[in-house]
Amino acid sequence: MFINVIRSYRDIVAVCDSSILGKKFEESFEGVIRQLDVKESFYKGEEVSAEKAVEIMKHMIAEDATFNIAGKEAVAAAISAGIISKESVGEIQGIPFALVLL
């Protein structure tokens, strides 16, 4: 999976599965179009193992970062890191995602 730490006044951590990088997912729900755009310019950072992603996410939550997470592996890693719960995961076209704004 890819993890990209974007340094800002409040760091942003973008995490996604390697298999969905650069893809766009869209669906209509009750007349509202929902879109998940896994842009390389945002999500592509260092390619890491799930274990390394968990380690980085645990460190970044302590730094008060925000998180954008997309894909089955990335969401599973975030759950394992204690960043999100299963109940906080959304889905677009079968692709799970979560946002964490603390």
Image (tube, rainbow, N blue to C red):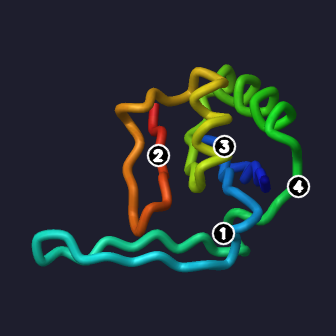
Which amino acid does the dot numbered 2 rest on? Leu
Cα distance, mark 1 to mark 2? 17 Å
Foreground mark, 2 or 3? 2
Q: Which residue is mark 3?
A: 11
* Circle on res. 75: none
Tag in front: 3 or 1: 1
Percent coordinates x, y for residue 8 in the rendering: 67, 49
The answer to whether 91 appears left or right of 56 in the picture is left
Residue 84 in the image: x percent, y percent?
50, 30
The image shows residue 94 at horizontal and vertical percentages of 44, 62
- Which comes before the other along the chain, label 1 or label 4? 1
**Marking on residue 46:** 4
Label 2 secondary element: strand
Q: Which residue is mark 2?
A: 99
CA separation in Å, label 2 and label 4? 20 Å
Rendered view: 30 above or below 88: below
Q: Name which quarter of the figure residue 9 lies in.
A: top right
Crowdedness of circle 1 by 10 Å Cα count: few (<14), some, many (20+)?
A: some
Q: Name the one closer to the observer, 77 or 5.
A: 77
Q: CA distance from mark 4 to mark 3?
A: 16 Å
Check disc 1 and report the residue beneath it.
20
Q: Pick whichever of labels 2 and 4 is earlier in the sequence.
A: 4
